[in-house]
Amino acid sequence: MASKRFVAKRLLLLVPVLFGVASVVFAILHLAPGDPARVIAGQRASAEQLQQVRRELGLNRPLWIQYLSFLVDAAQFEFGQSYSISRGAPVREVLIDRLPVTLELAIYGQLAGIFIGLPLGIISAVKQDSLTDHLTRVGALTGISVPIFWSGPLLILAFATYLDWFPTSGRIDSTLFLPNTWTLFGTELPLTGMVTVDAVLLGNWQAFTSAVHHLFLPALVIGIYSTALISRMMRSSMLEVVRQDYMRTARAKGQGAKITLMKHGFRNALIPVVTIIGIQFGTLLGGAVLTETVFGINGMGLTIVTAIGALDYPVVQGTVLTFALLFTLVNLFVDITYGYLDPRIQQ
Amino acid sequence: MEATLSAWARPRLWLVGTALLAGVIVGPAAVALLTLYGGGAAFGTRKAFALGALALGFGVIGWSGSIFAGRGIESMQRHLDTGSDWTEADSRRAMGRIAGFGGGMMVGVSVVEPLV
């Protein structure tokens, strides 16, 4: 398992990443046109009212004090209240409400990428230069090249509008209702906010089927890029590994081709692929913004789009920093896995 | 030990320090330009400070991102056969300079802010 020092070093690196993201968020919000005081006070507010709001928000203080105060608040994940999209509600509550929705989508997209991309990559490498290999490579190249804002509406058009196999939007049938809590050994616990997980926890299979039915298309759309990249990387990595001496030695000792490939080849070929899975989780989160907008799913992605349009700065700040935190935590997990797969990394 | 530390710190301090100094000089110049062509001193200082924060944030993210994922990106480029000469070390150096410049710009703007 990964050494404590290795994990501690990686955890320490989270600090500059989040500091950097907080600085960029601060910068972008101050560079963007529009006045937050006017958003809160309204278009017809007088100059005195605007000054009053600016004083309350601390916008009349020197810039470096505003910056430091913003960093301190960001470190505590305290972004105040939403200006407009959930007027008056603490941003933290808005994030807690929307985060599971996006996480669920990203996780299914990632799982689609891993469970489709890895086998495709291995098959493509094993059957190098065959028809299967050519088809997989063309498919991977197409998957990498096709943007979500194009593939999303296209899949909706094909599978929802013409074939009527899947719903066009939403997370669950509007006739179904899930409570806020579930009971475990007589104790009431809050639900996760991920409909598929909640439906399983509640034992509501009708809700589970409906949730899977609703999530299939969005997860597929978000997972296309991931699948394509993983399969391409897996193929390339596997081709490199199968040419190694230790693979030849294993075969020379009489080990079967499939066992050699899976026992010695797979784990070693997985090392660069695991890193890519972590890096492109950021793409998945970015993809969530587009996917949620296309499919009308009310997660962090749709929230940030709405918040930017409504100049709801606290929500934008909170959402961006949450995305950054998620991305860095996933990469930390990937680094630990990487260290497990290749112990030399920890040295 | 001391000599080793000094040998380690000196090039890094030079790298970031010179960029910081450049930022301190550019910051007030940016305030002047933005005030003249933008729309008042408040606008100029706000935007110049924000530009500095943007460069600082971008540099810090890039620096830590290079450490976080640099090896993975190097490996990905090798596997995808991109033919790029990008390295983690080069990226860290470049990002250090950008962050230093941004930080310097913020300091420069903060110094002139009470004056304008």
Image (cartoon, coloured by chain):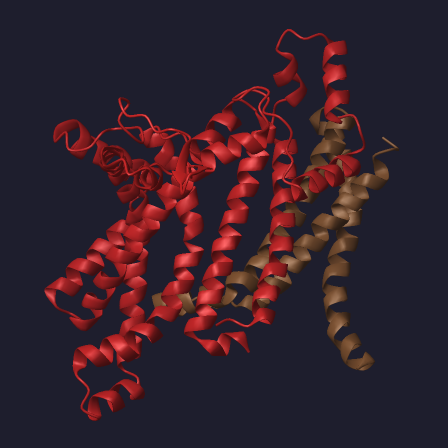
Chain colours: A red, B brown
Name the side, left or right, on which A166 lies relative to B97: left
Name the side, left or right, on which A52 lies relative to A43: right
Whether residue A257 can be seen here:
yes
> Which residue extends farthest right?
B115
**How many tags in the picture?**
0
Tell me if residue A39 comes above or below residue A58 in the rendering: above
The residue located at (25%, 40%) in the rendering is A216
Q: Position of residue A320 (x, y in %)?
A: 54, 39
Whether residue A144 can be seen here:
no
Tell me if residue A168 comes above or below residue B19 in the rendering: above
Camera-nearest residue between A24 and A90:
A90
Q: Position of residue A81 (x, y in %)?
A: 62, 26
Q: Position of residue A144 (x, y in %)?
A: 30, 51
Q: Position of residue A28 (x, y in %)?
A: 61, 36
The residue located at (81%, 33%) in the rendering is A62
> Which residue extends farthest front?
A186
Rendered image quadrant of residue A16: bottom right
Q: Which quarter of the rendered picture does the C terminus of chain B lie within? A: top right
Rendered image quadrant of residue B31: top right
Name the side, left or right, on which A110 lies relative to A314: left
